[in-house]
Image (cartoon, rainbow, N blue to C red):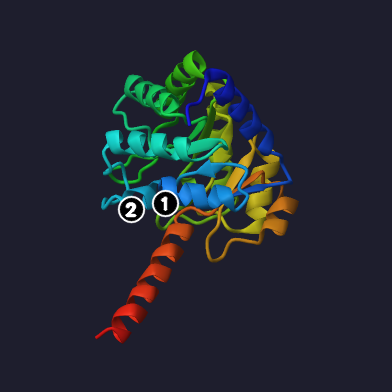
Amino acid sequence: MNTTIADAAAKAAAFHALHVRGRPFVLLNAWDAGSAAAVAAGGAPAIATGSWSVAAAHGYGDGEKLPLDLVIANAQRIANAVNVPVSIDLESGYGADPAAVAATITRVIEAGAIGCNLEDSEPADGSLRDVAAQVARIRAARAAADAALPRFFINLRTDVFFRKGVPHDVAAVELALERARAYADAGADGLFAPGLADAALIERLANASPLPLNIMVMPNTPPVDVLARCGVARVSHGPGPYAQAMQALQAQAREVYATSM
């Protein structure tokens, strides 16, 4: 379906409105047009991709190993397949510098997306970027978005809680909050903190963050009603739906081929 600027603006506004602290909406992350259509048909108010799932579905590893041209083409197919807002996981923005990140944002808006995820870590090794460097990237992304779709939603993922061997404690939350404040000032619209699963720490982060908080479902993540009481605004399933779908397909294949030989 072709989307006009007015349609895109309406979808962007609707996506913003979904982010209510204490009343989280849930994203069952898709990876291609078919999965997006299925999730939308199931009643999803919006579609979001997860980079790990999209990369795996295309035969690539995560960490910006999937070529940007494929990311954009996949985004366009998804946007054409559904009539709800679409947010695309762009990992670190596919750019060595802020100008390249800005170009990525322009391309994904042209593909039909009304939002994205951007990470604050280096794709090569997962190390956290310097705050000032990340702020420059966000400012460039915001400027590019405002030139094409002013309410484009930039969900800034902080990988503070994804670092190996680093404890999840109050100090880590304070580090995430320091980044959240800088990112909000630079033009981010949301804060994504994957890896964090402790309810008390989630509540501390949600209550102090200047941006609505997005938490990712993991085996030890509190249920949505607890996350709501913690003040979370958005819950993502990340790679879970893709992994479950592939497990079901593999189980079906085993059954089919076990009985056909």
The label on residue 250 is none
Residue in the foreground of this view, choosing between 213 and 90 = 90
Q: Amino acid at mark 2?
A: Ala
User: What is the secondary structure assignment of the residue under circle 1?
Assistant: loop
- Where the C terminus falls, by quadrant? bottom left
Q: Amino acid at mark 1?
A: Arg
Vertical order, 24 against 106 (above or below)? below
In percent of width and height, residue 227 lies at 68, 54
Q: Is residue 187 visible?
A: yes
**Residue 127, quarter of the rendered image:** top left
Q: Crowdedness of circle 2 by 10 Å Cα count: few (<14), some, many (20+)?
A: some
In percent of width and height, residue 237 lies at 53, 54
The label on residue 163 is 1
User: What is the secondary structure assignment of the residue under circle 2?
Assistant: helix
Q: Is residue 171 visible?
A: no
In the rendered structure, which disc, 1 or 2, sits on the residue that comes first in sequence?
A: 2
Vertical order, 191 against 5 (above or below)? below
Residue in the foreground of this view, choosing between 131 and 255 = 255
In percent of width and height, residue 64 lies at 30, 41
Q: Nearer the viewer, mark 1 or mark 2?
A: 2
Separation of disc 1 and disc 2 at Cα?
Answer: 25 Å
Q: Residue drawn 47% across and 59% down?
A: 240
Query: Residue reaching furthest top?
Result: 147
Vertical order, 92 against 243 (above or below)? above
14 on left or right of 74:
right
In percent of width and height, residue 3 lies at 50, 25
Q: Residue drawn 32% across and 49% down?
A: 55
Residue in the foreground of this view, choosing between 40 and 162 = 40
The label on residue 57 is 2
47 on left or right of 70:
right
219 on left or right of 75:
right
